[in-house]
Image: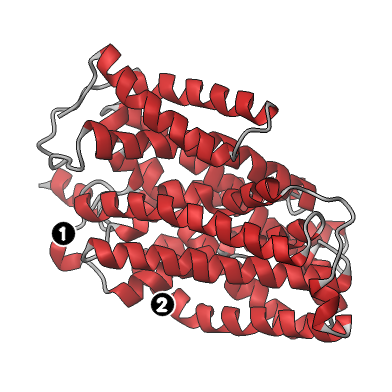
Amino acid sequence: MKTATASAQQNTDYELSAVPANQRKSFFSLTIVWTGFVFVITSMMAGGGLAAGLNFKDIILATFLGNLFLSAIAILVSVIACKTGLTFALITRYSFGAKGTRLASLFVPIVNLGWYTIQSATYGHFIAQIFDFGPVAEGITMMLSALVMGVFALIGINAITILGYIAIPSIIFLSLATAIKSVGVAGAFSVITEFIPSDPMSIAGGTTVVIGTWILSTATCIADIMRYAKNMKQAALSAIVGLVGGNSLLVICGAIASIAVGNSDLTGVLLTLGLVVPSIILMTTNIFTTNASNIYSTSLNLSNAFHMDRKILISVILVLSALLTLTKPYQIDSLFTFLNVLGVIVPPLAGIILSDFYIVHRGHYAPLDEAALRDWTISPWVTWALSYGIVVLLERMSFGLSSLNGIIAAIVLYPILVKIFKEKQD
């Protein structure tokens, strides 16, 4: 009896089981949570980075190409989550095995911790700039940011939904206001449209950067939200609204602001525009919604890896992130290095999951408590390693998009290796 009670307490957000049909949420609630996740200041920062290498027309093209690609991956993963009702971590059990999933589940939290830390540090740095804090005060502010943002994740999905209802309208309004104000500073919209970048990059390179902004979440974390979808149509449409609508809006608004001011550091751009109070509101709502969902997803993966209470794990993560903010990861070079790495490493993982569900298992998984799963499997790890090697090789040959190459390589290799190693799990 005591064990059952402890298990129930640990599984209050269905981190270790499927979401039952009577606990599924409306399309509007799903879209609020997902769009709130996608609405993050680093997308605006990515837009500023694109402005350093692309003209405005190419920025728009790269933004929509990148988000269409992300949407395709998001829809495919969302369908799996909706059908099974499982978190991403639990879905990996079907391909990586009952014990192998614990190791695979660690990858997402490590990357999520990097995202969470970058965003917390960005927010703390921004507040420090506004109030002219010294290095010590800035460090304290960044650490406090990392600690406070995790409160909503501690409470759970319902708290994150409420946060989204409050934050999203202000984010949309203030993002558009920032872009409009930027055009006013530039003098005319033609200044934006006729802008010539100082350090040109290819459209493929720009598209890869856009893909890098959300490839992790579209390939992994979105499952933790869309498992609550009532049907696949709602899950797919919600995914598209967040990416093609939400992420595109922020990237383009960030690019416009950067072109107008001539600075890719978004915090500096907002302050240069004189938008002090609006920028505080924008940064607060923007980063809090994303970081809450970020750390929530991280806790679900770690629950699968360690079978520990989600809230205890969140507390440990928050302390670690607070300490990591002192490395000042808000610097634009750090962000773009991080995005480029994600754009190469993460896609093969998505390819493995998609290939296992749609090709190896032909679009159907047995219920988790009935599935005959191996403890460990070799094929997904070999697939991941080979796919990464192929991506690096093709990147050196300047062939295609790294993210697309990674997913295609994994989708093709995985079923072959499953047959070679005879590792199909029922």
* Amino acid found under the numbered disc labelled 1: Pro
* Amino acid found under the numbered disc labelled 2: Ile
Circle 2 packing at 10 Å, graded few (<14), some (14-19), many (20+), is some
Between discs 1 and 2, the one toward the N terminus:
1
> Which residue: 26% across, 38% down?
357
> Which residue: 80% across, 68% down?
258
346 and 110: which one is in front?
A: 346
> Which residue: 43% across, 47% down?
219
Q: Is residue 386 left or right of residue 139?
A: left
93 and 232: which one is in front?
A: 232
Q: What element carries label 1?
A: loop
Q: Where is residue 223 in the image (x, y as percent from the top left)?
A: 35, 52
> Which residue: 60% across, 38% down?
400
The residue identified by callout 1 is 20
The residue at the far top in this view is: 420
Q: In this view, does 336 lie to the left or right of 426?
A: right
Quadrant placement of the C terminus: top left
Circle 1 packing at 10 Å, graded few (<14), some (14-19), many (20+), is few
The residue identified by callout 2 is 162
165 and 400: which one is in front?
A: 400
Q: Is mark 2 on a helix, strand or loop?
A: helix
- Residue 337 lies, with reference to residue 135, above or below; the image says above
